[in-house]
DNA sequence: AAGCTTGACAACCGCCGATGG
DNA sequence: ACCATCGGCGGTTGTCAAGCT
């Protein structure tokens, strides 16, 4: 899968690296380091250019490199970070210990790009659906097939929103109040009323723990898309843009900012202002 | 079985910013 | 202030393997 080795007009070897060349390069760097890549091949006795040596070392020979496919968790992180950072492969690679920018870039172009696009399509579809749902609930009581459910997660200070497509059963107070704790529900109130009550309960608690999003803390076994996105109370939109993540068959999570003013101003509409 | 297409990935190339003379 | 050098980065290419027709 590597390019056939050849020598250019300057006598510099190009193409795939042999095992022997790898050994020479590795041994030299382990002994003398790589303070000057341009001079390195000359002193190491390699017919390569400095850039080629650097690339080989950084992408293949460097210690603690992981080889093989990215895990599902790593792929999810790449997609998320790419969404935020764009083609900053080196920055993304820095968040994934043992992975190189080249490897991540290759993975992106070969498969993640497609997956991200699919996710984007699904997310857009759900956003549209949710907007329609909210518009409906703003004026009327929810119909059997158009409603939202908002609950407070037991162990996370987040507002969990279920779109109508995810709730197959028809609207009922029982459905609405599940998991909301002491938030009472009445048959005569609307979804917005229920949501407001839930949010009031949340705002009274002020118990948002500092759970700053840190990708390095993500277990590779975690499914990024199914992990609730929780931000700390000192929310910084630039650093951590809120996003309505689509989870396929899973719930959609929206953030609780920890700012009661947001609730006072009507959390529901505020929460659904897509950015 | 042969030819074609697609996916995967190592490696190359050119550009850019940092640094030092 | 200018220029040369270097390292680093992102885009692209070349090649092979696997899958498909």
Image (spheres, coloured by chain):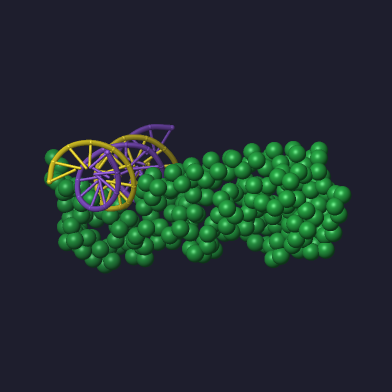
Chain colours: A green, B yellow, C purple
Q: How many labels does the image show?
A: 0
Q: Which residue is drawn at 53% across and 40% down?
A: A121
Front residue of A162 and A113:
A162
Residue A232: x, y in percent? 68, 57
Front residue of A255 and A183:
A183
Is residue A29 among the parts visible in the rendering?
yes
Residue A4: x, y in percent? 17, 48
Q: Residue at x 15, y 42 (%)?
A: A8
Residue A142: x, y in percent? 77, 44
Indicate left or right for A59 with A41 as reference.
Answer: right
Q: Which residue is drawn at 65% across and 61% down?
A: A211
Q: Which residue is drawn at 28% across and 66% down?
A: A30
Identify the image quadrant of the C terminus of chain A.
Answer: top right
Front residue of A254 and A84:
A254
Residue C2: x, y in percent? 38, 32
Indicate left or right for A12 with A257 as reference.
Answer: left
Indicate left or right for A240 with A14 as reference.
Answer: right
Q: Quadrant of the rendered structure where residue A152 is? A: bottom right
Q: Quadrant of the rendered structure where residue A185 is? A: bottom right
Is residue A39 among the parts visible in the rendering?
no
């Amino acid at each position: 899968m590597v390019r056939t080795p050849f020598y250019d007009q300057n006598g510099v070897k190009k193409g795939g690296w042999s095992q022997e060349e790898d050994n020479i390069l590795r041994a030299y760097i382990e002994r003398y380091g790589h303070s000057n890549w341009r001079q390195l091949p000359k002193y190491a006795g390699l017919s390569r250019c400095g850039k080629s040596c650097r690339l080989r070392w950084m992408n293949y020979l460097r210690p603690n490199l992981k080889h093989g496919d990215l895990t599902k968790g790593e792929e999810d992180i790449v997609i998320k970070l790419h969404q935020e950072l764009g083609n900053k492969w080196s920055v993304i690679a820095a968040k994934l210990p043992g992975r190189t920018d080249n490897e991540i870039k290759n993975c992106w172009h070969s498969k993640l790009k497609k997956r991200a696009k699919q996710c984007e399509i699904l997310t857009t579809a759900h956003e549209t659906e949710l907007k329609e749902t909210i518009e409906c609930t703003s004026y009327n009581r929810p119909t059997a097939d158009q409603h939202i459910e908002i609950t407070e997660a037991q162990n996370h200070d987040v507002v969990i929103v279920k779109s109508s497509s995810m709730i197959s059963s028809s609207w009922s107070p029982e459905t609405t109040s599940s998991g909301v704790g002491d938030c009472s529900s009445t048959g005569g109130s609307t979804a917005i009323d229920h949501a407001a009550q839930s949010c009031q309960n949340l705002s009274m608690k002020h118990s948002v723990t500092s759970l700053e999003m840190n990708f390095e803390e993500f277990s590779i076994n975690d499914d990024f898309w199914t992990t609730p996105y929780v931000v700390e109370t000192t929310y910084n939109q630039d650093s951590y843009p809120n996003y309505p993540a689509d989870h396929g068959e899973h719930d959609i999570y929206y953030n609780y900012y920890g700012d009661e003013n947001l609730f006072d101003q009507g959390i529901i509409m505020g929460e659904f202002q897509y950015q």
